[in-house]
Image (cartoon, helix red, strand yellow):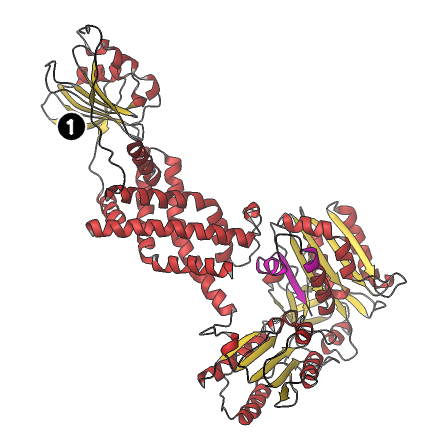
Amino acid sequence: MTISIWRYCHLILALASSLFLLIASITGVILAVEPIIHQTKDYGVSNLENVSLATAIVGLKENYEEVFLLEVESSGFVKASVLNEDFETLDIYINPETGEQLGEVTKRPEIYRFATNLHRSLFLKSVGRLFVGLVSFLLFIIAITGIFLLAKRQGGIKKLFSKVQKEYFEMRYHVILSRWLLLPIIILSLTGVYLSAERFNLLPNSTIELQEVAVSNAPNTYGKLSEIPFFKETKLSKIRNVSFPFSDAADDYFHIALKNKEVLLNQQTGAIVSSASYPFVTLASRLSIALHTGEGSVLWSIVLLVASASIVFFMYSGFVMTLKRRKKLGAISKKLDKDVCEYIILVGSETGTTFDFAIRLQKALTLKGKDVFLTELNNYSTYAKAKHIIVLTSTYGEGEPPTNARKFKTLFETVKQPNTINFSVVGFGSLNYPDYCQFAKEIDLLFQTRKGFHRVLPLYKIDNSNFTDFQKWASQWSEIITVPLKIDPPKQSKKLKLISFKVVEKSELNIDNTFLLRIKPKRKIKFTSGDLLSILPAGTTTARQYSIAKIGDEILLSIKKHEFGLGSSFLFNLNENDIFKAAVETNPQFHFPIYSESAILISNGTGIAPFLGVIKENKNADVVLLWGGRVKESSNIYDNFLEIENLKNSNLSLHKCYSREENKQYVQDLVLQQQTTILKTIKNGGTIMICGSLTMQHGVLDVIEKILINSDTTLDTLINNGHLKMDCY
């Protein structure tokens, strides 16, 4: 809840100020270029701290008829306003050691003048300046909320700079750039607020009054300006500007602005007749201008340019992230409270397919004016006004629930509904597996045996996500509840891009009816460990997918042959040098992060397949493999490969267990034994990857939750941050 509040604050502020931020950032980029280009001109003198004011004055007096003003820019350039021998008034850059002209002060290019006026006030004068000041303040708040969100995302402020492990471009670089440019953006925003406050006289008065300085002794009279001690002792690095007297009269003074004060100096006696130090407000204003504009520092100007440009990127990437987040949440038009809805849809979905059916049902009911609450089975709770509960769930493995439904049975035993509710259960599965819709059967039975629930329809089973079957169920169900529904059909799934593969090698069946298959694409394609090989056995329309290991330019598969498995039987019947058609589908959410410094790889049975490729390709990360089989002979087909890699890579640690040996051990037992390593990996921003059966996955997740009880992170945080990756079946 807390992170949602911060996220919405961050988003709303960004949206509210988006137009002004866009203008400010684009003009900021333009204005950051100006000091960089200015600094490239060859007018600088590197040793201003060694050049005295006396030297500069002498040089100017010798070269020009009259001198009006000497100014030292923050860039280090020295410029002067002078009268030459042709009685022309010139503004020039000079060499302060000789007074020689280096170049003329040119008129500021119109693009910078335009950008400055737009940046400061949007051409709206005082009203515009007010808007700019407000947007600067909003930018500061956006940055602060961004810090909070970033810290939560990375698992705490101490892990702010830990590895970023989100796959898509916008999110990854939103995080990376925000970490490095957060401080410059905060400086830009705060200095913008300060300068706006100064413009509207909201700061203490910074006007100075020169105070007369008493002279204790009779002053000396100097014949030459170069002999005056103040001029000889004061270096140009301490000077801001010097206004020269118009005449030789004793009461016509030099007005000298130093870095920290102003003085009036008698040109005949060299005595300081009056002086005043700048107040803090003035010094803070100058610092704000320097920090906000980059004047005087090419490096800081470049930082400001990148920071300004990054604001445009943050607006774009934030927009993309918001759209993706809303899409992930099902693009539900309104989020209703669970206790005001009559219709509750509970979903168990591993890949998202079943969730898509649930969203279509929700939309159909909503169009009929019904209040519908949609959530995962893991979130089962009491529903104060519910009249109907509709469960849509898939089944995985040997009758196993999807990950987002694994807590449902326990919750169901503890939750008592306040009123009688009608229920309907729809199961999604595949007739090719013996435990077809098994989890849906168990849920249907739970509801039947609990008082307070009335079954509207018998359990309805749908094979291979057949939409026509789902429409048939929806038609029957809507007729009973007397609410006619129209379910929008899904878009046609993309066609597989089949290419030819050659069988390089196939192992014999292992004791567990598992075998290895090494294949090579007939043409060059991109793939990596964790991607999926999709095949279409003859006479079928639904692809079978197998997780792959990348071994050089070849693919290694670990497959269990099922008696009635069309996909596994097809692959087992292939022989060396056979050619067959298949497609490689990218699976980016299960790629090994290239920047991860440590990883825990957890698998059982054939789930080891992608990890064989990860281990083969790993160069730097510390990797711990936890694998479980039925008996010791189960690992025979992997042992040679693992032993060779273990000898080659000192960063690899192997741990195996067996569930049917005398000392029974399951993968979750290995996880518990390695809890210190797991906590260290999490603390250091490492990665945990799980591949294998859903039964194993559920057991492992339960153990990890227990391990994390006393830590500063949660299982959900690890999943959301991409530090915990799963691909189970």
Percent position of residue 700, x then y: 72, 62
Which residue is denoted by mark 1 in the rendering?
90
Element type at marker 1?
strand
Instruction: Confirm whether the magenta stretch covers residue 272.
Output: no
Q: Quadrant of the C terminus?
A: bottom right
Magenta-highlighted residues? 704-729
Figure quadrant of residue 667: bottom right
Q: Judge the density around disc 1: few (<14), some (14-19), many (≥20) Cα neighbours within 10 Å.
A: some
Question: In this orientation, which residue lies closer to the viewer: 673 or 320?
Answer: 673
Percent position of residue 643, x then y: 81, 52
Question: In this orientation, which residue lies closer to the viewer: 144 or 66?
Answer: 144
Percent position of residue 73, x then y: 28, 29
Percent position of residue 443, x then y: 68, 80
Q: Residue at x 66, y 53 (%)?
A: 710
**Going by the image, does 612 lie left or right of 240?**
right
Question: In this orientation, which residue lies closer to the viewer: 208 or 324?
Answer: 208
